[in-house]
Image (cartoon, coloured by chain):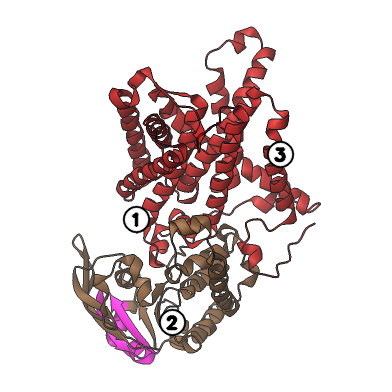
Amino acid sequence: MSSLVVENLSIEFGGVRAVDSVSFEVEPGETFAIIGPNGAGKSTIFNLISRIYEPTGGSIHYGERSLLDVPAHRVVDLGIARTFQNIDLFEQATVLQNLLVGRHSRMSRNLARDFLFVAGARSREREHRRKVEDIIDLLEIAQYRDQRISDLPYGARKNVELARALCAEPTLLLLDEPASGLNQEETDDVSFWLDDIKHDLGVTLVMVEHDMGLVGRVADRVMAINDGKLLAIGTPEEVRADPAVQQAYLGTVA
Amino acid sequence: MQIVFKTSYDQDINLLSKTGEYIRVTLVVLLMLAAPLFLDAYYLSELGLLLVYVIAGVGLMILTGFTGQVSFGHAAFLGIGAYCHSILLTAGVPFTVSIILTTTFTGLIGMMIGRSASRMHGFYLAVATLAFLIIIETVLGEWTSLTGGYAGLAVPELQIFGYYLSELWQQYYVDLALTLFVVWGAANLLRSPTGRSFLAVRDSELSARSLGVNVEWVKIQSFGVSAAITGLAGVLLAHHLSYLAPETFGVLESLKLLLMIVVGGLGSIPGAIFGAIFVSLLPVILSLLRDVLPEAMSQQAGLEPMFFGLIIVLFVVFEPDGINGRWRKLLHFFETFPYYRKASFVRQKSYLKTERMR
């Protein structure tokens, strides 16, 4: 198991320092939450880790490997998968196809052999389908299996996106607001699943979340940021009690 | 009402799982095999041409319908295929070797275009592919020593393993065999990781990338297969035309291919087939219609393009899913009779999407 080590990470967009030398470390097996007001740079940190943005300074290591040496489509090979803030599924494809794309990094593929569907292709498909079915069972989305994403309600899409990330068999999962737009009951479901994912699958979780109830329930440690700068790291209670965090959320006492 | 009860993963892996599909496809194939028995020469050659357009349509469908990369330049691949094949045949290369060399060559050119197109989106890609088409058309016209220029190039007779296949029905069976192969291959792609990565790139490059899909490479591959298949259609088209001229492979031909897959139904293999049937049947229907229409109308020069345009506009407005979409609704109506509701196919507006980081 490897830990995620982020050191002095910075990125500038024009004159705006969206992330300003932020350092943190995520231990294997823990649940780490990033909180902060809107525009604090939480999602930007995720996009830096998944290599969508190129940082202007600092380093990101996962285990021995430096993520900055790896192109965006290779990040998943290191065992890092993610979900997106505004659900980013393959809309015109079925749930099953979406989940099978989730297996992409684990499947052997070759254009000519796929075109001819050579011997062995069928057993490969079956084998990966079996893995996909495990995830389908875990997240209880069996009834949607053959539906197109564009036909699914919002909550189901959230689950499918989580399932798709899990299909890559990650060791580290980046969840960008897993509970946004969900009702109380659905949020409770999410917190149970996150527990399952952590304990049964042994996945390290890093999440950006606004729902402090959920954060308090599932997170081992919390990092608060504001204006791209780190405010506090610690247990949920410690961070909640931190004066700088309270000031960022509630403003200064006049 | 029919309910498919799935008991095996194979039912999802098989190309045809429903009994109805099985029967329909078998019937169509049998009918196609038997066609030379009951069709006269004119209709048989039209049917052969239709098959060529099915191949070209599948080629473009892979790129535009499955990978989401619009191409206004696909007639160029048709042209390169036709010319390359004819030139090789004239040089004495056997048919089977020439067909392999030609598809490989057009495929490689497609990959080169894909390499430069992999960073372009939407409108810019359309313009770039259009420019490519114009370049190829000009080259075909001006490189007189190789292509015969605007005077044209005669296509040698169809000859396989030393046997002349000059009869119409023999040529038709060559078309049919290759059509079945291409359709089967394209369907295979879709049930494999490569084809799924095409769909992924079409719907969201961002999340495709985060799942390990090399988006640039997928686009190069997609352009490559698409061009190779369209090149193959060009090879067969050359034998149908028997005389090649650069104007044949111009912008209008490109538009025809594009309109074919739009009317047929983007994003499905049956769509390419329906589209080919549509563009091949329409001129036949129009020529019949000319006899009925009053003289003032039937003698108008733009009658054919007008009907083409009108039908396309009607499809875009009323049935964006194309003929294939209409067909699926019809099937659904019978399968769920009497429970069909119009709302079954009404799609919700998509939720907010992450567009910033394309």
Q: Which chain is brown?
A: A
Left or right of A10, for residue B159: right
Mark 1: secondary structure: helix
Residue B173 x, y percent position in the rendering? 60, 37
Residue A154 appears in the picture as rendered: no
Camera-side mark, 3 or 2: 3
Q: Can residue B116 be found in the magenta stretch?
A: no
Residue B134 x, y percent position in the rendering? 33, 30
Q: CA distance from mark 1 to mark 2?
A: 40 Å
Mark 2: secondary structure: helix
Which three-letter amino acid code belongs to the residue tagged 2?
Met
Q: Which residue is mark 3?
A: B31
Q: Which residue is mark 1?
A: B216
Q: Which residue is mark 2?
A: A212
- Mark 1 nearby-residue class (10 Å; few <14, some 14–19, many ≥20): some
Residue situated in front as seen by the camera: A72 or A219? A72
In the rendered image, the vertical position of residue B133 relative to residue B149, given as above or below: below
Mark 3: secondary structure: helix
Q: Which chain is red?
A: B
Magenta-highlighted residues: A220-248
Q: Quadrant of residue A31?
A: bottom left
Residue situated in front as seen by the camera: A182 or A87? A87
Q: Quadrant of residue A188?
A: bottom right
| Quarter of the image with the C terminus of chain A in it | bottom left
